[in-house]
Every structure is written in structure tokens, then in C-alpha cells.
Amino acid sequence: MSRSFPARPNMARGEEIARLLKGEIVQVVGCTEPAAIAYAFRTLIRHMPVPPPPNSFCACLHVSRDAFRNASTAVVPFLKKPGILAAAAAGCASRTNDFNVFADFDLRLARKFMKNGAWLRAVPVRRNGLYVALQFNADTGIILRGRHDHIEQLVVFGRDLTPRQKLMPRPPRLDEIFELARARHPALEALALDFITRQVPPEKGYSLEDQIVRRIAGRMAGYSHPVMTITGSGNQGIFLGLPYRRLYQEQGAAILPAVVFSLLAQVHLSHKHDRLSRDCGLATKAAPALAAGLAFARGAAPADIRRLFRDVPSRIGGLPCEGAEPACGDKARRAFQAVWNGA
């Protein structure tokens, strides 16, 4: 009698997906929308021969509406101030060359940039997802689009310095997610393990649910501990990372296929939905992704996962995004209860 086995994924495709997932996981201090604004300033300034001194130059910033909303409300770490001016000031004073701009900046210099905000003109624009366009003058500017750290265009004094980046692979289909998680692809499981072990540290004396709520609310209020983000969201990274770290402590490497499944489901759902929108991503992406991984670990079939993708957001109910605020913690509680209590 012949036996049927799950199809082994194409190994080249597995490596592609690992590269995609690696690009979607970034460790960041602070909220990612103000970080994107700060990153635009830092990137542009570090390519200039002389950095502009405070209050002696003008900057025009155009930001997609959803990113503008979040950047206007999130508190910038260390500065302990919310808003786009704070993000821009930290970017002008940053000493880092990667997306983790709030991890190291000159606090005194940033405060000088904040003293008089007349140098900055910030305008929300009708664009979907993440879009940041910063211009110092007619021939010096930068555009970020799509991923928070993706430089679409960089021009300094008329010279095109846009990085030549390799195109990212297409996101995985659901059948590919099943195949890759079942195959226990080493690179994917290494990324999954790194994601959960480097996530924000646990808090003794608090339940898992309360830890998620506190970490997300604290992050919106300026919490300065690095967070492992997924598809541009630290809150969704915390929401996925903390439960799986708990399960990893209990089950060891046996839980890693489920972690891989959830992370790839998050990427899959982020491709179907805008990365930023009026709807809270905890409800539309992270909660169904967590539920899908847990269901996969219990032997769920593709039809079951598709049902979860539909049912979990409905079970949570409408969660409009009103900005990057401590109230995001309450939304995380509601989303977590919908997943964990039904698991």
C-alpha cells in the first residue's frame, strides 16, 4: 500500500522565504512610525558633508495619513515627548546608521532641535501604508515606502544615492506556509528562535496576558527596551513573541514549527492588508496569525486556518486604530483573550 507524504518545499523557495522573513524582523527601540521619520532624517543627514545645525534649515515632510496619526501620538524614547517634531529631532541627532535610530542619539542636540519647531513642516498625505517623503531643498531628499526601512529614493545635492536593493521575494501562499513549517527549515526555525528569545524580557509577577498588555502600553508611552518587530510592528511582535517564548520554555524546539507558521502567516496577512490602516493590526493580522500557528501545532488543515483568518477578527470585533497610544494595550488584551481562551 502506498503512503502519501506532504510535498517537500522547494529548497530554493525556502531560502527565499527565509530572506523575506529576515527582512521583516527588525529590532527597534520605540514605535516604528516615528522611527521611520527619524530614519529618513538620519539617513539624509549622514550623507551630507556637514550636518545642519538646529534651527538653521528647513525641512518639508510628507507622511501617509496612517503613519502620520501614529507618529503624532507615540512617545519618542529618552526624549519622552510625543509627536513628529520629537521624531524628527531625534533623527537629526541620531548616531546610528540603521533603522534602530532611537537606540543612540544625542539627547541634548535633539532638545535643541525641539526648542523651535518652525524649521519643520509636516503634512499628512492620501497614501496607503507607509510613506515618508522628506525634502531639505529641491535637490536633496529621501522617500521611504512600503517597509518602514525601505529607501525608494535618496538624492543629495542632485546626486542619486539610492541603495540598489535586491527585490524581496513574493510572500508565501498558505500551502507554502504549511510545507515550510512541516519541513522544519533550519534557517526559518533559527529566525523564529531568535525572534522569541530576543523579544522584550518577561516581567516577574505578571500573567502572560498582563505582560503583553503592559509591554505594548509601555512601548507607546516611550518604553526604551528594544523590541523585535514583525512586518513593521513592534506591538504585533510582542503579541506573537511573548506567548511563543512561554511555550518554548515549556516545550522546547517542538514549538518552533508553530512559531514559523505564525510568523509566515503574519507576513501573508500583511500582504493582503495594508501594513498601516484604520484598523488595528492586532485584530486583522497578529491575532489570526497567532491563532493559526497554535492551530497548526494541533494538526489543523488549511481549511481550518482559512476559517481562523476570517473568524478571529470577527470574534474580536472592530478595533479602529486611533494612534500609537497606551490604549493599544487594552486592544491587545481583547485580541489575546479572543485567541488564547479559544485555543
Image: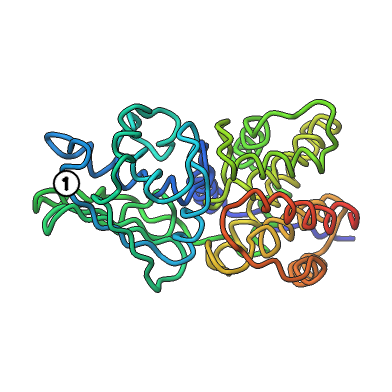
Instruction: Between residue 301 and residue 27, name the one nearer to us.
Output: 27
Q: Relative to 317, is 241 above or below? A: above
At horizontal 80% and vertical 37% (from top left) the residue drawn is 254
In the image: residue 4, left or right of residue 83: right
- Tag 1: amino acid: Phe
Percent position of residue 161, x then y: 18, 48
Q: Relative to 96, is 282 above or below? A: below
Instruction: Between residue 5 and residue 31, name the one nearer to us.
Output: 31
Instruction: Between residue 211 and residue 303, name the one nearer to us.
Output: 211
Q: Which of the 4 image quadrants contains residue 249?
A: top right
For mark 1, give the secondary structure: loop
Point out the image quarter for the N terminus: bottom right
Disc 1 crowd, CA 10 A, few/some/many (<14, 14-19, 20+): few
Percent position of residue 134, x then y: 27, 55
Q: Relative to 169, is 320 above or below? A: below
At horizontal 52% and vertical 37% (from top left) the residue drawn is 27
Q: Which of the 4 image quadrants contains residue 61?
A: bottom left
Instruction: Between residue 297 and residue 8, name the one nearer to us.
Output: 297
* Residue at the disc numbered 1: 57
Which residue of the protein is positioned furthest toward the left in this rendering?
Answer: 158
Percent position of residue 52, x then y: 17, 38
At horizontal 44% and vertical 48% (from top left) the residue drawn is 34
In the image: residue 142, left or right of residue 252: left
